[in-house]
Amino acid sequence: MKKEDITNIKQLLSSPKKIVIVPHKNPDGDAIGSTLALYHYLKKGNHNAKVITPNDYPTFLKWIPGNDSISIYDYQTKSCNIDIESADIIFTLDFNAFHRTGNMEKPLSESKALKIMIDHHQAPDNYATYMYSDVGMSSTCEMVYNFIDMLGDTDLIDADIATCIYVGIMTDTGSFRFRSTTNKTHEITAKLIEKGADNSQIHNNIYDTNSYERLQLLGCALSNLKVISESRTAYISLSQEELNRFNYKKGDTEGVVNYALSLDNIVLAAIFIEDKQEGIIKISLRSKGNFSVNEMSRAHFNGGGHTNAAGGRSDLSLTETIEKFIDILPSYNDALNNE
């Protein structure tokens, strides 16, 4: 951010404000971690801060410090709208376009509150007065740490804030293995551990607690794995019937697409998940090297994200969506085979 912007924000936060903090719909570890980290930080400044998520999120994220303070818009619409309407400042974290917030899009876009964006996704919309946007960052949580640092307040980071930030960095870097993980990322995580983040316990809470049904669903997903060798592509599909059979809960398919990407000689991986309630097929895309799934998703699946990780959606049936995906692959073969 510009030095002038930081000066202005510091002045804004010098007296108590009504502040709403919002992540994207279907929030993940980085979204929940960053919003709660900022929530704890703002509470230390005596602000009336509230986190509002557009919808519910996985159980494996509900142990994070401050979780009980979160309001869920889909369940508490009336009170959340009152909070949004009365807010002095709205922070939008881990997204950069209001449509990413589902049913919250209208109240957020109509709100007169000053908007501050902190995000690392490509092609941000121009809705915020102050934008901290950096696609080179590993995670929004790393950016929240930097934001607190720019405000000169890293001494306020306690074990709760450190834990929240660590969660987002760990999950969005794939446990520190993605290309976005830099030496600076590791320096920050070291400081978080010094501040009280229990890295081993955090990892266990996120990754090492599985239900029997979730593992059965994983087995089903892997049995559906298909490979298209000429395009160096692998994909997985899960129908609504299969999700129901294994008592699917939000978050149960988190990371499953990475199994497809882990195959030898695969550059592009996808998972297609049927959602009868929303009437769509949810799509997650992953890639290696310089192949941009962000561009593919924007061009064909009404989505976007990062170069190597993106999401999208389709209004076609599950079969038709997969057929569309297979049909467009030949146009990407040169790029995929040059990786």
Image (cartoon, rainbow, N blue to C red):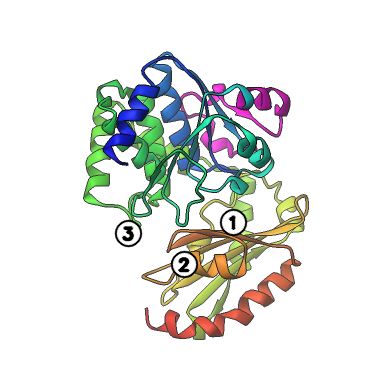
> CA gap, disc 1 to disc 2?
15 Å
> CA gap, disc 3 to disc 1?
26 Å
Q: Which residues are magenta?
A: 55-84
Q: Residues within 10 Å of mark 1 (few under 14, many from 20)?
A: some
Position of residue 270 relative to residue 188, above or below, is below
Instruction: Classify the position of the C terminus by image quarter.
Output: bottom left
> At 63% from the left edge and 68% from the top edge, which residue is drawn?
224
Q: At label 2, which amino acid type do we have?
A: Leu
Work out whether residue 229 can be spotted.
no
Q: Give the image quarter of residue 237.
A: bottom right
Q: Secondary structure at mark 3?
A: loop
Q: How many marks?
A: 3
| Residue that badge 1 annotates | 218
Position of residue 312 relative to residue 89, above or below, is below
The reply to whether the magenta stretch includes residue 69 is yes
The reply to whether the magenta stretch includes residue 82 is yes
